[in-house]
Amino acid sequence: MLKTLIYDGTWAGLLTTIFCSFEYKWQIATIQHRDEPVQSGLFVTTETILTDELKTKRVLLGLEKKIGLQGIKELYYVFLSECKHRELLILRSTHYYFKSNPKANLNYAHDDILKIKKTVRSVSRERHRMTAFVRFQKMKDGLYFANIEPDFNVLPLIANFFKDRFADQKWLIYDLKRKYGIYYDLQDITEVKFSHTLDRNTIHIHLDDDELHYSYLWKNYFDSVNIKERKNTKLHVQSLPKRYWKYLNEKNLF
């Protein structure tokens, strides 16, 4: 009988789910987040999976032997892509890796592997853009705050980048689309959540008195380096899509 597996929506939870599918030789119909409505059927039963650290490590060790750390990183990127049925894609790929010779993740002729590569490329591009397009604003309490709405869940991928770059400042990057953020307190990075009703239209930031001044300086810098005679709007939009403009000081200054 087919099974619908329910997990907690975490990376460790998914790896535990994969372990159980191997351990009990289940036939999987679908894998769902526990907050989603359960899809049931006449010949489908549900099974709730509890995240287990030991099972997670066993799957990771097995994958590392087969596809290395780079292959595991690719699966993690697919998980963060939030694409539909990504859990089944990761499960099918993992089955394929364990049954194949090492480096099976380089087999571009395999449909699932090709889909993974395309997804990784999209997530990587979004990660790169977020490292370039995040604009902090200083608040009255000295905290540097930035809102983002990336296409993929890239906050876990950019945390260390900003920790290394702004190690001497407290900062908070908040993903309005997914309603959570990462906060750096000069030592550690922690995940934070605000109200579920928080969005760009309702959030009010108490900016530092000098923030407006620095924002104008930033905008003037861009205006001064701009060469109007060489303006290429099509190329500009291609490199900097308009969906990012609303959080850029130089594009949306008061």
Image: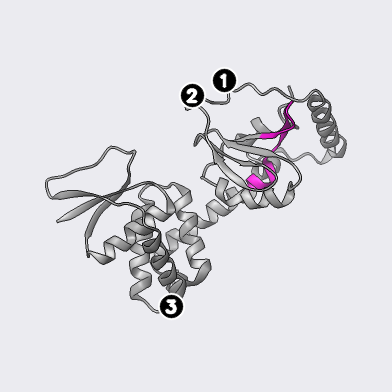
**Could you tell me if the residues under marks 1 and 3 are in contact, i.e. CB atoms within 8 Å?**
no
Q: Earlier in the sequence, mark 3 or mark 2?
A: 3
How far apart, in angstroms, are the residues tagged by discs 1 and 2? 8 Å
Q: Is residue 11 above or below residue 229?
A: below
The residue where tag 2 is placed is 197
User: What crowding class fits label 3: few (fewer than 14 Cα within 10 Å), some (14-19), or many (20 or more)?
Assistant: some
The residue where tag 1 is placed is 202
Q: Is residue 105 above or below residue 150?
A: below
- Would residue 211 appear left or right of 124 to someone viewing this image? right
Q: Which residues are magenta?
A: 129-145
Q: Who's the residue at 76% across and 45% down the image? A: 168
Mark in the foreground, 3 or 2: 2
The dot on residue 102 is: 3
Q: Secondary structure at mark 2?
A: loop
Q: Is residue 219 above or below residue 66?
A: above
Mark in the foreground, 1 or 3: 1
> At which x and y percent is residue 183?
62, 40
